[in-house]
Amino acid sequence: MGAIDGKVDLESDEEIPFSSSAATNKVEALDFEMIHLPSRPVIANSWIARHIGIRAVRSIYIVLLKAKINMLLPFGPLAILLHYITGKHGWVFFFSLLGIIPLAERLGYATEQLAFYTGPTVGGLLNATFGNATEMIISIYALKNGMIRVVQQSLLGSILSNMLLVLGCAFFSGGIIHYNKVQEFNKSAAVVNSGLLLMAVMGIMFPAVLHFTHTEVHFGKSELALSRFSSCIMLVAYASYLFFQLKSHRSLYNPILEEGDNNEECDDDEIPEITHWEAIGWLSILTVWVSILSGYLVDAIQGASDSFNIPVAFISVILLPIVGNAAEHASAIMFAMKDKLDITLGVAIGSSTQISMFVIPFCVVVGWIMGEPMDLNFQLFETATLFITVLVVAFMLQEGTSNYFKGLMLILCYLIVAASFFVHVDPSNDD
Amino acid sequence: MSHKLSVEMESIDNESLHEFEDEILSIPEMKAQKSHPIQALGEGSFSGGLQARGDKVWRNAVCKSIKTVVFSNKLNMLMPFGPLAIFIHIFTGHNGWVFFLTLLGITPLAERLGYATEQLAFYTGPTVGGLLNATFGNATELIISIYALKHGMLRVVQQSLLGSILSNMLLVLGCAFFCGGLVFQDKEQVFDKATAVVNSGLLLMAVMGLLFPAVLHYTHTEVHFGKSELALSRFSSCIMLLAYATYLFYQLKSQKNQYVPLNEEGSQNEDNSSDDDDETPEISKWESIIWLVIMTSWISFLSEYLVNAIEGASVAWKIPISFISVILLPIVGNAAEHASAIMFAMKDKLDISLGVAIGSSTQISMFGIPFCVVIGWIMGRPMDLNFQLFETATLFITVLVVAFLLQDGTSNYFKGLMLILCYLIVAASFFVHVDPLAADEAGLKT
């Protein structure tokens, strides 16, 4: 679980001025992938104001300053400044993109810290919901602006990026590091998960297929009704998916935290680095911050497309998902390099499944509430791309092994997909 | 010998009636096994009363036969709907109700047809029995399709057969997985991966064979637009029928040796070709044949009304015809298989459920559909394999996804739920689906 910040924190460890205390030793003895925050266990003192002041500072330190990725943080305010001062959309867009990345990563971090305190069930739910919080926030802003195609394309691009880019990089890096052996992963879990993803993708494809065979009863309207109906069904499916996973895998859930370590309570070997309330507080702050920046980001898309001469499709499908997926990307690669491909696969496929079973239908429903005609009609090219990609990757995963060549092939396929979107323009403008 | 047995059994008649009623529903599953039905069906031989005594005996026999076949099954409560439908047709001509009631009326008949087929299979030995099962397994769908062909409702034929495949792969399988998973919540049910993979591979190939005329037509690359595609369809159908014959031959031949052990988990059985084995057939050979004929003609009779009422029902209830053909009609044909698949899943015999579902789909795609094309050819109807883009895409995607899903050999209630939900989405898409062909035919001359 602490995977996401694992990599970053590991490196920043050396920068920590404090020396390790007993807690650190205990922690270090346990595991590498844990959030390796050295020591500094929760300070339980009795000073009040000063204590709070220290805590606040410590909290800010832990959350904001420790991870190297937070170097990108200043870009956020910079983007806002640029927006008001120059109004140059290209740069505003670019800087907001850079500014959101660390926030997304910290959001994941805060979610995990909170998950320590809430126990496995709610923790799992939290992870499931906030895992794609960034994409959801960006999508909701885009919906509010009526940029429906951007929403569809960015969510679709997120799935593509997870299945091709993240997986490819993970296989590639892992393969290079462990080049003398073939890395293996749990075949059956991968097959089951990719089967689910395939079904989910199938569920969201039908409205598009219906529309494109021009066989609707009321052209345009039936397809919207069908999309809304399908979305409700997919949300039901997602709820049962969560229920099923949490119920049947409850016993498996805990051990994932630590390689088979005891842990019923939260004060276990991985000491959460910030307290319960701090976690909630940071969660809210980061969410708000992400929302603000997303607002600027979304506003700047059209302008950036004009000034950089890139199609909006490319921006939505390729650039936006990079932001949302950055943290998962980093953690997947890190786990692959540690020869824990199962976790990598879980991250990549799990994220794709969540997007197709939850985020996309959720956006349709939110659009319904907002009165926007957001539907599941992804246009023929995107639909075909999605289906082909998921099918091919699902087949590829059946073997249960990985090597750097497979990773390279996936990355190259992603480059081809990206290139096709670079020269892709939406026909829907003519409809 | 069987008579003595039956005399003893008669005393337990009443109990067995209740106990084995559920298992009677299992009869239809055997047709998918293509082997002798070897389940502990109605151990009580209800119709034991065949003593040599002339007319009275004959009447007794008839009564017992009727009792066995018609009254012993709960599903047969739906039987009166058949004649009722005919009455309504004659008196009110309200197509909506005629359609609905006929639908209800055919369901028990389809199930009894399966039952009679199996009873007959007891007497004919494994080979012919398998063939019988294979042919009559989808008899209802074939009969409905032939009537629709006669009326020139080609799209209804295509859509109902396609809907039958979809319903088998998604609904039947989904319900089976779901119910089985709910009953066996603590463990994951497993099925024979190898068989499932082989069968779904066959299905995939069969579907691929059916898709080419549609793909050809839709890429507008035919030599003679419209005509080449029809010729190609007919040619492909003949090839598919050949493939089907080989499939039957291969199955029956390779299973011949394994045939026997399928009996009551390895109980004594050198030859089950005779009727004196553990499962005593409930009705005699001639009775089975007669009932087979009676059921078939009754179904044909009702199908006539059914098909006639389709368009009227569509107008009366404001449902697109495609929804009726793809979703409602196959439910009738598949009802019995549906029930048996669920029952077997709940008994943790997933292999049989899978056999039923996938076997039925394979039969329809390798036999039912090509057969209809050939019949259409004979009748002079332009029935082809061009299923229209939406149906073709749906079929292909569904078969591909389900084939993939079956590869890991496990099942749980969530998978079943997902399959059912996917079926709901497909059904919903057909609800808002209108045929472009209708518009085409109105606009152009065909």
Image: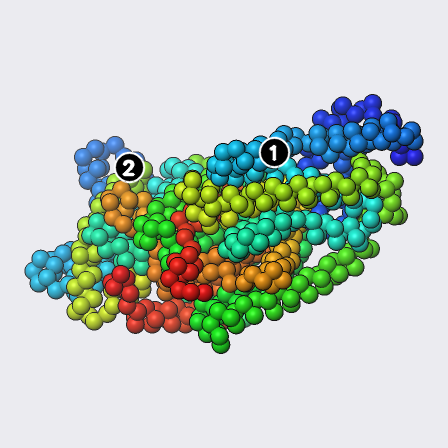
Image mark for residue A358 = none
Q: Is residue B17 above or below residue B184?
A: above
Callout 2: 10 Å neighbours few (<14), some, many (20+)? few
The answer to whether residue A166 is seen in the rendering is no
In this orientation, which residue lies closer to the viewer: A211 or B324?
B324
Query: Looking at the picture, how far across and down is residue A370, in whole percent?
Result: 24, 44
Residue of label 1: B83
Query: Looking at the picture, how far across and down is residue B194, in whole percent?
Result: 66, 56
Q: Quadrant of the N terminus of chain B?
A: top right
Residue found at x 66% / y 49%: B139
Dot 2 amino acid type: Trp
In this orientation, which residue lies closer to the viewer: A156 or B374?
B374
Residue found at x 45% / y 67%: B218
Residue A173 location, quadrant: bottom left
Helix, strand or loop for disc 1: helix
Dot 1 amino acid type: Pro
Residue of label 2: A277
**Viewed as shown, does residue B267 lie left or right of B173?**
right
Q: Check the residue under mark 2 and report the chain it is in.
A: A
* Mark 2 to mark 1 CA distance (whole Å): 72 Å
In this orientation, which residue lies closer to the viewer: B187 or B409?
B409
Q: Disc 2 or disc 1, which is closer to the eye? A: 1
Q: Quadrant of the C terminus of chain B?
A: bottom left
Number of numbered discs overlaid on the protein picture: 2
Residue found at x 21% / y 63%: A94
The answer to whether residue B325 is seen in the rendering is yes
Check chain identity for marks 2 and 1: say if they share one.
Answer: no
